[in-house]
Image: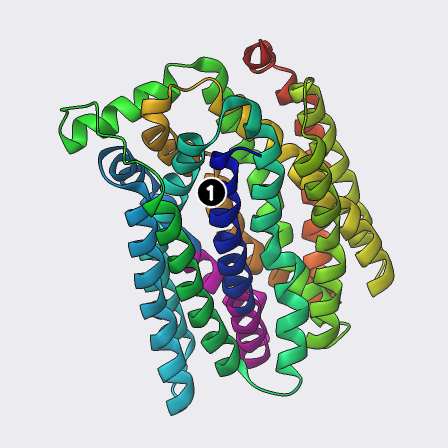
Amino acid sequence: MSSGFKRFLLLWIGELISSIGSGITSFGLGVYVFNSTGSAAGMAMVTLLGFLPTLLLSVPAGVLADRYDRRLLMMIGDGCSALGIIYILICMRSGEATLARICAGVFVSAVFSSLLEPSYRATITDILSKEEFSNAGGLISLAGSARYLFSPVIAGSLLAVSDVSLLLMIDICTIFVTIITTAIVRKGTAVKPSESRLSFMESIKEGWQVVHGRSGVFMLIMVSSVITMFMGILQILVEPMVLSIADSKVLGITETVCACGMLVSGLMLGIMGIKRGYVRILRLSFFMAGVFMVGMSLIENVIPICIFGFLFFAMLPLANNCMDYLARVNIPDSQQGRAWGFIGLLSQLGYIVAYGISGIAADGLGVITGKGVGRGAACMILISGLSLSVIALTLLRLPKIRELEK
């Protein structure tokens, strides 16, 4: 094992712990808001405000990642993101945790967290060889999936004996663990001097040209943006769908069982990697993910939801690994930060649409059908799954996307 991969593993452990902590907070706040309001729209609003700053600030964060110490930016972003969580904790303790105040705390935390992703992605390029990218990709997907794999069952069990305040305190503690691991990696990794003398705005413009000028990369990003819209709808609506037939503890177990699919495929990718056929695997994994979304929505029972959810989440590391590799090998190392900033912005625009419409649509369909918000959420998931499969079979066959592998 190379020294670079050892440093990556240490950095990955920190991100894994951080992901678990943030997942615990996300689960707890989602359950708290749904139980308080009885509406999927309220849950969607909290998620949107937690996601929007990270998305909108990803481009300037990417420029910073190319101009300054990437590991230091990660430490600042992680540490300051705790401020928003602390604010929500204070509101909880004083009995004044309104929806508006929860949204404000989540928003503040997300603003600082926006520094993390471009610096994290670019740091991986700094410390790994090209041959190690695929193996690292599986572990990256696994760390990102930890918020769905471990966090729900932990949070659901803790909520059975305590309240949301305990979950927030655990999240704050995990943030400091992540800062320590990043500091250790920073000490053993040389800071690459900026090769550009461009102004901040000129650097942003150059980052756009890097992504837009590679037509295959740009097409892949825009297709993934459409795909994330349908996946975001599932992410928001699976909780009200399950909470309409079970309690928070069962919801936590259900989400963990489903996310075990990511654990299985993520570990397989970490061990074996993918050697070829990236575009074909990308197309197949998204098609099957859509099919499994449809399966989750059909029966009002936790068992089939767990089965199809497991299969759905097993497809995500495969798809993410392929998209990550195809983008990474087609972008120069010195421009990775700026490029990942734009890639993060464009590829996740679909989440804004999903978070904006999913809760309202589910509430509306529940009223129209007379079956409640749970079945309204299931109907939206069904439509999204069908759409995802169709897009996988059509748009991902574009010649420019197939040429990225060459």
* Image position of 192 (left or right of 224): left
Nearest the camera: 252 or 33? Answer: 252
Q: Is residue 1 magenta?
A: no
Residue 387 makes an appearance in the image: no
Q: Quadrant of the N terminus?
A: top right
Q: Indicate the quadrant where residue 239 lies.
A: bottom right
Q: Is residue 332 above or below residue 379?
A: above
Q: Is residue 48 magenta?
A: yes
- Residue pushed farthest bottom? 94
Nearest the camera: 346 or 110? Answer: 110
Residue drawn where x is 65% and y is 39% of the image: 317
How many neighbours does mark 1 have within 10 angstroms: few (below 14), some (14-19), or many (20 or more)? many
Q: Residue 226: percent from the left, percent from the top? A: 55, 34
Residue drawn where x is 71% and y is 65% of the image: 374
Residue drawn where x is 42% and y is 32% of the image: 343
* Image position of 184 (left or right of 281): left
Q: Quadrant of the C terminus?
A: top right
Q: Is residue 287 above or below residue 143?
A: above
Residue where numbered disc 1 is placed:
7
Q: Indicate the quadrant where residue 393 lies.
A: top right
Query: Bounds of the magenta span?
Result: 25-50
* Number of callouts: 1
- Name the secondary structure under disc 1: helix
Q: Residue 170: percent from the left, percent from the top? A: 49, 74
Residue drawn where x is 65% and y is 16% of the image: 397
Nearest the camera: 258 or 51? Answer: 258
Q: Residue 150: percent from the left, percent from the top? A: 65, 62
Q: Residue 254: percent from the left, percent from the top? A: 75, 64
Type of amino acid under label 1 = Arg
* Magenta highlight: main SS: helix
* Image position of 56 (left or right of 402): left
